[in-house]
Image (tube, helix red, strand yellow):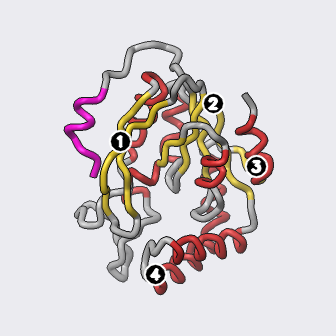
Amino acid sequence: MPSDTASAAAPAIPSVDAPLAQVVLIGGASGSGKSRLAAQSGLPMLRLDDFYRSGDDPALPRRDNGEVDWDHPGSWHGDRALAALEQLARTGRAEVPVYDIAANDTVGTRLLELDGCTRFVAEGVFVAEVAAEARRRGLLADALCVRRSRWITMVLRFVRDVREHRKPVGVLIRRGVRLARQEPVIVARLRTAGFRTVSVRGIRRLLARP
């Protein structure tokens, strides 16, 4: 879990109307290319998946078969993610956790700084959970959902997860089929949260704008 000590030592968020920077949220199904698009943009990137709960957290939601439901928002510290997003937007820096998915645990922290950028990107499985509040607080520049064939996404996700040893292969296959079936629901939920569905090429163009 992120260190409470580190959070307590973080600079206070100033009470101002306009933030120093605004965030472009990138959503989509797991494996749709969110992280790659964010990294290729050259903008500072907040990885929202780094706010997952540790694997031994008793608050983790579970499926009927006893497996942890890593696709449930309850497996994630949404309040901490939103706090980091706002701190970054208003102060230009935030200390954020580094999460190892294969180990199911936070393995450290890193200092994320904007270095004068007026936009940054944030992406993750649960990005829809912070959209409304980011918009209400004046932190949101745009909200984009990756539009891509769910079957291509399923293949890309499986290759990535096997390469990174994220979970046992049996778990990855079951999860991959389940997520492919659920993808239209995931996309619809993002659209309800105010995300625009945009092609991979279109998102690249939008992020490249000054």
Give the spatial CA distance, label 2 vs label 3.
15 Å
Q: Amino acid at mark 4?
A: Val
Q: Amino acid at mark 3?
A: Val
- Image location (x, y in percent) of residue 193: 60, 44
Give the spatial CA distance, label 1 vs label 4.
28 Å
Which residue is at a point 57% across and 71% down the rendered structure image? 160
Q: From where the camera sits, is residue 196 visible?
A: yes
Disc 1 residue crowd, few under 14, some 14–19, many 20+, Cα 10 Å: some
Q: Amino acid at mark 1?
A: Arg
Could you say whether the residue bearing mark 4 is in a helix, strand or loop?
Answer: helix
Residue 110's label in the rendered image is: none
Please check the rendered image and state whether residue 136 is part of the magenta-colored stretch, yes or no: no
Of marks 3 and 1, which one's residue comes earlier in the chain? 1
The dominant secondary structure in magenta is helix
Give the spatial CA distance, label 2 vs label 4.
36 Å
Labels 3 and 1 touching (C-beta < 8 A): no
Which region of the structure is painted magenta?
1-10
Report the residue marked by disc 2: 141
Report the residue marked by disc 3: 198
Pick the quarter of the image with the C terminus.
top right
Give the spatial CA distance, label 4 vs label 3.
30 Å
